Image (tube, coloured by chain):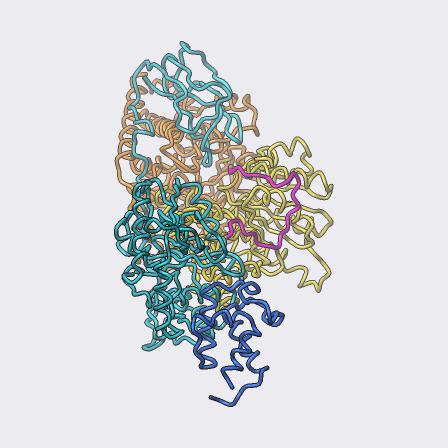
Chain colours: A yellow, B orange, C cyan, D blue
C-alpha cells in the first residue's frame, strides 16, 4: 500500500495513459508550461513534448469541440477544462455534439473523448469559482459521469474511461487534490459502473459522492459514538447510476440521507431520492433526507461559505431528525 | 514624454499610481499573514493604465473590469476602507464582504467591477452601451479586459455586435503578455490585438501601457470619439505585471531577466523622473504623498480588522430583490 | 522583535517546506528582500521579508515542513515599525459561530387530511403481515409517525407469529451487536469474579408443591425464582444495578433484569424483564415466557437489548456447573447460575445429599469490590432459602 | 371430547406445535423414540411451552410428574391416545 496525494494519483494516471497509447494526448488551459492549475500535469510537458501536452487559449467551447473532432478523427484526447465553472462555455459542444452525435447519426459515429475538470467549493474563491454542477451533466443521455473521491479512483478511473467508446466526464473535487490516501495495489484496475460501500452499517444509509464522501464518513464516526451505525455509500458514478447498490442498502437500513454539494432544488440528490422512493418505498421507515448547499451564490467569507455548504454536523442533525 | 499638464495634474497622476502600488504591496503582505484568502491578482506594474485612463471617464460613465481590478476601483474613487474590508470579507466591504478580491462593485460610481470569468464582462459592457444608446444618453461604457480574453468567443462576438450597432462602448485591453501561464504568442495566431479589432471595423490603437501620459492622451481622445457617437473604439495597452498571475505561482512560464527588463520601465519611477526633470517634483512632495498614502492604508487596515462579519442569518439575503 | 511566519502562498496551501534560507543570522535584511525559498506542493517560491532589520534567529531548518503561520525566524526591527498588525494567532479568526441553520424552513408539512394515519411504508407493511391494527399505536418516529420499532413493540405473543421478513439478517445484525459489546467489555471493564454454592433444596421442594396447585399454563420454572432473588438482592446492594457512562457509574432506580436466552441458530440475546423486583412470580413467569418465545421466533428488536440494568445467565441446562460471564456494557455486573446437582451437604452436623447450584458474580472493579459482591451473593442465598417470600 | 383423531392427525398436530416452538428445527426427520431435548436442543422453557400447547390443543392435564412421558414423539402419541380412549 503506498500513500500518495490525490494530485499525484491523477498525474500518474495521466502519465500511464500517455505511455500506453500514442493516440492519447492532453489538451487544456495551462496544462503544459504552467503544469496545470492544480499541478496535475506538472512535468508532463518535458516528458511527452508540446505535441501531446497542449496549452490551449482560453477558448473552452472551441477546445472542447476540438477534442470531440479529434476523437472522431481517431485520437484519444483527454481535455482538461480548468474548473466546472468555465465548462459552462462548452456546454453546447458537450450536449449537442459529444453526447448526441452517436444516436443522432444513426450509430455511425462514436466520440471516445475524456474530459476532466475540478469542481466544488471550500477555498473561499467566491461565487463564480465555487460551483458543483456534476448533477447537470448526469442529466445528459449519451455520456458517462464519474466522481472519484479516493486516490485509487482518481488514478484508476482515467485509465478505465479511456477504454470507453463514448464520452466520459471526470469531476475532481478541488478540495481533494492535496488529500493523501492509500493506493490499493500498484496499478489497481477500477470499474466505472458500480457504487462502493465505504463503511458498512445497519441503522441508516449515507449516500454521497466526490468531495462530500469525507464529510459523510466524519458524520458516521460521530454517529457511531451515539451507538448509531451508518452505512456510507460512495456512488463513484453518477451516470449510469448504480441504483441496485443504493436500493440494497436502503432495504437493509430502512433510512437514507443523501449528501450533495449542489443546491437542493433540482440537485442530483433529488434524483437519488426519487429513485429510492420508486424502488424501496415499502422499505422506508422515514422520508429520504437531503443535505445540500443553501440556495445562495457561495459567499467569499469563511464563516458564510461554511454555513452555505454541507457539513458533518448538518448531516448528523439530519440523521437525528430521521430517527425521530 | 513632454508633460502637457500642470504640476498639480502631474502630482495627481503620480499619487494615483503610488496609491495603487502601496495598496497592492500591503495586500500581498496581508495575504501571507492569512488575513486575505482565496485568489489575489495584483496590479503591480500596470498602474499607469488605470491611473492614466479612469480619470477621463465622467461619473455618469460606466466601468466594467475583471478580477485584477484593485487599481481601477481605487482610481474610480471607492474608499480604500471599503476595498480593504472587502478583501477581509467584512460586511463593511464594497460588496458586503461576499465577493472578496475578485468581485469589487460600487453602484454609486457605476463600477460594475469584478466579473471574474475571463471575457465575461464584454457582453455586459455591450449591453450597458446598448441601453445608453436606446435611451438617448451620451454616456460611455469603459470595458477593461486582459489579453487572455481575446481567445474567448465573447471577445469576437462583442466587438462585432458593438460595431454592427455602433454602440458607445470603449474596449480597453490590458495586454500584459501572459494569460495566466501562457504567453500571448503561444495562444494567439494573430498577437496584434488592435489588428483583430480593425477586422471588425473598430478604430483601434496600441498604447505604451507603461507611460501614464501616453495612456492618458490616447484614452482621452478615444473617449471623446465614442462620446461623439462615432461607435465603439479599442485601445490595446502594452503593459506588464511585475508579480505572479495570482498568489502564488512559480512564474515558470517567463524568464526572470524578462521581468527585470520590464521593471526598468517601471511606470512610477519613470514618471517621477520625468516630473523631477520638468521641475515639478521635489523630494518633499514625494515624501508627503508617500506619508499620506501610508496613513490611508493603515487606517483602511485598522478599519478592516475591526469591522464586523456579516451575520450568518443574512446568508440568503438578496438572492432575490426584496426577499429575505 | 518581529516574527517571520510561514506565509500563505496559495488558496489551497495548509503547510510549506523550507527549501533554504537566503540570509544568515546576524545579516541585515530590507523590507521586500528575499529571505527564504519555500516549497508549496506546486512550486518553490522566493519569499520576501516584510520587515527591515537584523536577523536575530533562524528557527525552522531547511527541509522542515511546517504549517502556515509557524514562526520561522525572528528579526530585530530597524527603522520605522509599520503598524504591527497583530500576528494572525492573536487576532480572533472570524468567529465561526455554530451557524444556526439559515432561515430556509423546510416547507411546512402539509396538514394531513383528518384521520389519515402517519405511518412509514415499512411499518405499514409489517403491521399488515402481523395482523396488527396500527391505528391503535402511539408513533415514536419523525413527527410522531409509527415506525418498524413501534410495530415490533406491539407484537403480542400470539402463537401463530408469522415469520417476519428478513429474520436471517436480523440474527446476523444481533450477532454483530453482541460481538461489538463483548469486545468492548473485555477491553474496557476490569472484571472481578466471585462464586458461592447455594442449597436449592427448599426452593425446589416449594416449587414442586406450588406447581401442583397451578394449572399448566401458570406453572413456574425455578429460573424465575433465581431472577426474583437477584432482583430483591439488588435492593440491598444497589451499586451493582448501574450503568457506566462518561467515566462514572449511574445507579438505575428501576431494576430491569437482562435474561440470557440462547438461540438455536446460534447466538445469545439478553432482553430485559422490566421491574423484576416489583412483579409477582407469576407475572415474572408470564413475561419471561413471552421474551423467550419472541427471542426464539426471531422477532426481538435490537432496541430491546439495550435497556437491562444487570444480566442473569443460567447455563445450568447445558450441564455446566459454574459460569463466569462477560459483563454486557454499559452494565456493571453479571450473575451466573450453574446446574443443580446432588452434593453431600453438612446440615446440623449430618452429611446429607442436597440439590445445590453454583452462583457466580462477574463485576466491574471500577464500581464495586469483592466485599460488596460477596454480600450480594450471600443475600441471594438467603432469599432462596425462603422461596415463599420471593 | 371431539371425534377421536386418527393417529396420523395427532402426529401432524404434535409436529406442528413442535415447529412453532423451534421454528428452524426440521421436524419431518424427527426420530420418534429419541427425546426432544437432545434432537431439538429444547430447554425447560421450550418444553413447558410445548406442554402448555398440548394442553390447549388436546384439552388434557399434564402434571409435572408426567413430563418424562412426553419427552419423545412416541411417548406423546401413546399418552394422547390413552387419554383419548
> Residue B247 appears at what percent x and percent y?
46, 32
Q: Does the rendering let one see residue B180?
A: yes
- Vertical position of residue A71 compared to residue B295: above or below: below
In the image, farthest residue toward the bottom: D3
Identify which residue, A223 or A102, lies in the foreground: A223
Q: Residue furthest front?
A: C350
Picture quarter with the N terminus of chain A: top right
* Residue A10 x, y percent position in the rendering: 60, 40
- Residue at image x 35%, y 43%? A303
**Along the viewing direction, whichever of A313 and B57 lies nearer the viewer:** A313
Query: Can residue A226 be seen?
Result: no
Residue that extends furthest to the top in the rendered view of this protein? C26
Q: Residue A35 vs residue A51: left or right?
A: left
Q: Main secondary structure of the magenta part?
A: loop
Depth check: give the residue in front, A241 or B296: A241
Q: Which residues are magenta?
A: A179-200
Instruction: Please indicate whether residue C196 sits to the left or right of residue D73 in the image.
Output: left
On the image, the x and y values in percent for residue A233 come to 52, 53
Which residue does the image show at 39% across and 34% down from the upper left?
Answer: B71
Determine which quarter of the picture holds residue A172. top right
Q: Nearer the viewer, residue B10 or C83?
A: C83
The count of marks equals 0
Give yes or no for residue C172 being in the magenta stretch: no
Quarter that holds the C terminus of chain A: bottom left
Q: Indicate left or right for A188 with B314 as reference.
A: right
At x 49%, y 34%, the residue is B237
Please say if B239 is above or below A176: above
Q: Position of residue A163 (x, y in %)?
A: 69, 50
Residue A191 lies within the magenta run: yes
Amino acid at each position: 500500500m503506498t500513500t500518495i496525494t490525490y494530485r499525484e494519483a491523477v498525474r500518474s494516471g495521466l502519465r500511464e495513459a500517455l505511455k500506453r497509447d500514442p493516440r492519447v494526448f492532453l489538451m487544456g488551459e495551462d496544462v503544459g508550461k504552467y503544469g496545470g492549475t492544480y499541478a496535475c500535469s506538472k512535468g508532463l510537458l518535458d516528458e511527452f513534448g508540446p505535441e501531446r501536452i497542449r496549452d490551449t487559449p482560453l477558448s473552452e467551447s472551441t477546445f472542447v469541440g476540438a477534442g470531440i473532432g479529434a476523437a472522431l478523427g481517431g485520437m484519444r484526447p483527454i481535455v482538461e477544462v480548468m474548473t466546472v465553472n468555465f465548462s459552462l462555455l462548452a456546454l453546447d459542444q458537450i450536449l449537442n455534439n459529444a453526447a448526441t452525435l452517436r444516436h443522432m447519426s444513426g450509430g455511425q459515429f462514436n466520440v471516445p473523448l475524456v474530459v476532466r475538470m475540478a469542481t466544488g467549493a471550500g477555498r473561499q474563491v467566491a461565487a463564480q469559482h465555487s460551483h458543483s454542477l456534476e448533477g447537470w451533466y448526469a442529466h445528459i443521455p449519451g455520456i458517462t459521469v464519474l466522481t472519484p473521491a479516493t486516490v485509487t479512483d482518481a488514478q484508476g478511473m482515467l485509465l478505465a474511461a479511456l477504454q470507453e467508446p463514448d464520452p466520459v466526464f471526470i469531476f475532481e473535487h478541488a478540495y481533494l487534490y492535496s488529500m493523501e490516501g492509500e493506493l490499493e495495489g500498484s496499478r489497481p484496475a477500477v470499474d466505472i459502473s458500480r457504487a462502493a460501500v465505504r463503511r458498512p452499517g445497519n441503522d441508516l444509509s449515507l449516500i454521497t459522492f466526490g468531495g462530500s464522501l469525507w464529510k459523510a464518513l466524519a458524520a458516521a464516526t460521530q454517529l457511531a459514538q451515539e451507538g448509531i451505525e451508518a452505512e456510507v455509500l460512495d456512488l463513484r458514478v453518477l451516470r449510469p447510476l448504480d441504483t441496485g447498490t443504493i436500493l440494497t442498502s436502503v432495504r437493509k437500513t430502512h433510512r437514507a440521507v443523501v449528501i450533495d454539494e449542489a443546491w437542493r432544488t433540482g440537485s442530483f440528490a433529488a434524483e437519488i431520492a426519487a429513485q429510492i422512493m420508486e424502488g424501496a418505498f415499502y422499505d422506508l421507515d422515514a422520508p429520504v433526507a437531503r443535505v445540500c448547499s443553501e440556495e445562495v451564490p457561495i459567499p467569499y467569507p469563511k464563516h458564510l461559505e461554511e454555513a452555505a455548504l454541507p457539513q458533518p454536523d448538518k448531516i448528523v442533525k439530519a440523521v437525528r431528525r430521521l430517527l425521530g | 514624454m513632454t508633460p502637457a499638464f500642470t504640476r498639480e495634474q502631474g502630482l495627481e497622476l503620480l499619487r494615483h499610481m503610488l496609491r495603487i502600488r502601496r495598496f497592492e504591496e500591503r495586500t500581498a503582505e496581508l495575504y501571507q499573514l492569512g488575513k486575505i484568502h482565496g485568489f489575489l491578482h495584483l496590479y503591480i506594474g500596470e498602474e499607469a493604465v488605470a491611473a492614466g485612463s479612469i480619470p477621463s471617464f465622467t461619473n455618469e460613465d460606466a466601468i466594467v473590469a475583471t478580477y485584477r481590478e484593485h487599481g481601477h476601483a481605487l482610481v474610480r474613487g471607492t474608499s480604500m476602507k471599503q476595498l480593504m474590508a472587502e478583501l477581509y470579507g467584512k460586511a463593511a466591504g464594497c460588496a458586503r464582504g461576499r465577493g472578496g478580491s475578485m468581485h469589487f462593485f460600487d453602484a454609486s460610481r457605476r463600477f460594475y467591477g469584478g466579473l471574474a470569468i475571463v471575457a465575461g464582462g464584454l457582453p455586459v459592457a455591450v449591453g450597458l452601451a446598448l441601453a445608453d444608446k436606446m435611451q438617448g444618453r451620451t454616456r460611455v461604457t469603459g470595458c477593461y479586459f486582459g489579453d487572455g480574453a481575446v481567445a474567448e468567443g465573447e471577445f469576437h462576438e462583442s466587438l462585432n455586435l458593438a460595431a454592427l450597432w455602433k454602440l458607445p462602448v470603449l474596449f480597453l485591453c490590458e495586454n500584459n503578455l501572459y494569460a495566466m501561464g501562457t504567453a500571448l504568442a503561444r495562444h494567439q495566431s494573430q498577437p496584434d490585438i488592435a489588428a483583430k479589432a480593425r477586422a471588425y471595423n473598430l478604430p483601434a490603437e496600441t498604447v505604451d501601457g507603461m507611460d501614464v501620459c501616453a495612456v492618458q492622451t490616447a484614452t482621452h481622445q478615444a473617449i471623446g470619439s465614442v462620446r461623439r457617437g462615432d461607435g465603439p473604439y479599442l485601445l490595446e495597452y502594452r503593459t506588464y505585471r511585475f508579480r505572479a498571475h495570482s498568489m502564488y505561482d512559480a512564474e515558470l512560464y517567463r524568464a526572470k531577466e524578462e521581468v527585470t527588463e520590464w521593471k526598468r520601465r517601471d511606470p512610477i519611477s519613470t514618471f517621477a523622473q520625468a516630473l523631477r526633470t520638468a521641475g515639478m517634483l521635489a523630494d518633499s512632495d514625494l515624501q508627503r504623498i508617500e506619508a499620506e498614502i501610508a496613513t490611508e492604508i493603515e487606517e483602511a487596515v485598522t478599519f478592516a480588522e475591526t469591522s464586523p462579519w456579516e451575520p450568518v442569518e443574512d446568508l440568503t439575503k438578496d438572492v432575490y430583490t426584496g426577499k429575505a | 522583535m518581529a516574527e517571520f511566519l510561514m506565509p500563505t502562498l496559495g488558496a489551497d496551501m495548509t503547510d510549506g517546506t523550507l527549501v533554504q534560507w537566503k540570509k544568515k543570522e546576524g545579516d541585515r535584511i530590507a523590507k521586500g528582500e528575499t529571505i527564504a525559498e519555500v516549497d508549496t506542493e506546486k512550486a518553490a517560491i522566493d519569499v520576501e521579508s516584510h520587515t527591515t532589520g537584523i536577523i536575530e534567529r533562524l528557527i525552522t531548518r531547511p527541509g522542515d515542513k511546517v504549517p502556515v503561520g509557524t514562526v520561522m525566524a525572528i528579526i530585530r526591527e530597524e527603522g520605522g515599525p509599520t503598524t504591527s498588525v497583530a500576528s494572525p494567532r492573536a487576532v480572533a479568526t472570524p468567529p465561526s459561530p455554530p451557524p444556526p441553520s439559515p432561515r430556509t424552513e423546510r416547507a411546512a408539512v402539509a396538514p394531513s387530511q383528518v384521520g389519515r394515519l402517519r405511518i412509514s411504508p415499512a411499518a405499514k407493511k409489517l403491521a399488515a403481515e402481523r395482523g396488527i391494527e396500527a391505528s391503535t399505536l402511539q408513533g415514536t418516529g419523525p413527527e410522531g409517525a409509527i415506525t418498524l420499532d413501534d410495530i415490533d413493540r406491539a407484537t403480542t405473543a400470539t402463537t401463530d407469529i408469522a415469520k417476519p421478513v428478513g429474520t436471517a439478517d436480523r440474527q446476523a445484525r444481533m450477532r454483530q451487536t453482541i460481538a461489538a459489546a463483548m469486545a468492548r467489555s473485555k477491553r474496557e471493564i476490569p472484571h472481578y469474579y466471585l462464586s458461592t454454592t447455594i442449597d436449592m433444596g427448599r426452593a425446589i421442594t416449594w416449587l414442586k408443591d406450588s406447581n401442583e396447585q397451578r394449572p399448566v399454563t401458570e406453572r413456574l420454572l425455578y429460573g424465575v425464582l433465581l431472577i426474583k432473588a437477584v432482583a430483591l438482592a439488588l435492593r440491598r446492594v444497589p451499586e451493582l444495578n448501574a450503568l457506566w457512562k462518561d467515566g462514572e457509574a449511574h445507579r438505575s432506580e428501576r431494576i430491569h433484569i437482562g435474561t440470557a436466552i440462547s438461540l438455536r441458530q446460534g447466538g445469545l440475546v439478553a432482553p430485559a424483564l422490566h421491574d423484576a423486583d416489583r412483579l409477582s412470580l407469576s407475572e415474572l413467569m408470564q413475561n419471561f415466557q413471552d421474551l423467550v418465545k419472541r427471542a426464539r421466533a426471531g422477532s426481538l428488536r435490537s432496541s430491546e437489548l439495550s435497556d437491562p440494568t444487570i444480566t442473569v445467565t443460567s447455563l445450568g441446562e447445558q450441564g455446566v456447573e459454574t459460569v463466569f460471564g462477560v459483563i454486557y456494557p454499559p452494565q456493571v455486573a453479571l450473575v451466573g447460575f450453574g446446574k443443580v446437582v446432588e452434593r453431600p451437604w453438612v446440615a446440623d452436623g449430618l452429611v446429607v445429599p442436597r440439590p445445590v447450584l453454583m452462583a457466580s458474580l462477574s463485576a466491574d472493579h471500577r464500581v464495586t469490590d469483592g466485599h460488596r459482591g460477596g454480600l450480594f451473593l450471600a443475600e441471594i442465598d438467603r432469599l432462596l432459602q425462603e422461596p415463599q417470600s420471593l | 371430547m371431539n371425534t377421536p383423531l386418527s393417529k396420523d392427525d395427532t402426529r401432524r398436530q404434535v409436529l406442528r406445535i413442535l415447529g412453532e416452538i423451534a421454528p428452524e428445527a426440521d421436524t419431518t426427520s424427527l426420530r420418534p423414540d429419541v427425546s426432544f431435548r437432545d434432537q431439538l436442543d429444547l430447554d425447560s422453557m421450550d418444553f413447558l411451552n410445548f406442554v402448555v400447547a398440548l394442553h390447549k390443543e388436546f384439552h388434557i392435564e399434564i402434571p409435572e410428574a408426567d413430563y418424562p412421558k412426553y419427552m419423545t414423539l412416541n411417548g406423546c402419541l401413546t399418552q394422547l391416545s390413552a387419554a383419548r380412549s
